[in-house]
Amino acid sequence: MFFRTATLRTVAINPDQFAYVGVWSMGVNQSLNIAIPNQPCQMNQVIKNEMRPIIKKIAILSAGMLTFVVLMAFPFGPLLPWSPIKPGYHRTTFASAEIYFNRNERAPEEYRELDQMAREAEAFHHLRFHQKVTVIACKNWGDCERGLPWLNVHPLGGVTLATGDVIYITPTLREKNFSLREFLRHELSHALISQNTTIRKSVKLNEVAWFNEGLAVSFARQHDYLSREAFLSRAATDELAKFIDPAKIDQSSPNWSARFAYPAQRYFVEYLKATFGDERFTQFLVKCIADPDNHSTLFSEVFQQPIADAIGNYQKAVRTGQRPLVE
């Protein structure tokens, strides 16, 4: 009898022994009937001999499918940045970056400022880019989702990979009329930090959001999250430590708001620079990206006070109108 799918059933011979009787098919016009030999060892050898060509076919098929999946991951998946072919995109090359934009549209003029932005980022962070950055402006949400399948990309305006050499710009900016210039500067900050540390440490820095995001929002001089006036209004009643101190942040809290947290973290970075000087902040920056696991200890060593005390003093400065400064 011919079966489309492989079946395997156990047949009892006596209370102490069992044998396998199977009818196997690989989707071709052939069937395999395995007879039960008299001795268990002979039975095992027969099964092994008969199974070898089947296992070989399965291995070849699996290898082919895996190869296909990997190849498709380049032009249509998370390996798109490293694919020699990027369907639907045209490339523009600058000294510091390569831009991939919808081939049916003209890239916005802000992309032409990337070289200047990169130089300003180096001066701001006191670091250097070590390789070009690939910027992919997703032409639709499908491309974003395939390129970043491990993230919920819809709330995001931009994403920088921990390698520091790839930036994705999402359709959010166009849909919500956010500033492309600000978001490019923001992601360049992340890229520069990542290029000056390891991938593991770059990921770890996400847990030190006041530093990682505060720097990026400060360099970008972003206003799309919240205006200074709106920030001051909420900061008059909310405890800022819950949006800055890694030990107190709870993003599952109903009171959590990234749009409030980002400006709070930005203004904290600017408060530290104004209070302790840019040189001392840079000392912390260099130490923190080298050893993010010990960021709290490093903070106390560099600024001579625990981060909790610094946040408390920052909150007083905010509520007395000393910070943030008017731009």
Image (tube, grey):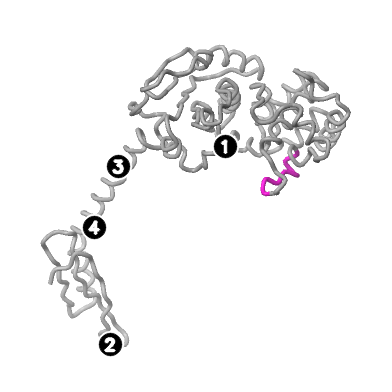
Which residue is located at x 46 percent, y 23 percent? 134
Sequence-wise first label, 2 or 1: 2
Mark 4: which amino acid?
Answer: Ile
Label 3 vs label 2, nearer the camera? 3
Question: Which residue in the protein does label 1 denote?
Answer: 200
Label 3 vs label 1, nearer the camera? 3
Identify the mark at residue 121; answer none if there is no mark. none
Label 1, residues with CA under 10 Å away: few <14, some 14-19, many ≥20:
few
Inter-mark Cα distance, 2 to 1: 58 Å
Question: Which residue reaches farthest bottom?
Answer: 15
Which residue is located at x 26 percent, y 71 percent? 8
Query: Which range of residues does the magenta coloring cover?
Result: 245-252
Question: Which residue in the protein does label 4 denote?
Answer: 55
Q: Main secondary structure of the magenta part?
A: loop
Q: Quadrant of the N terminus?
A: bottom left
Question: Which residue in the protein does label 3 denote?
Answer: 67
Near-viewer residue (34 or 223): 223
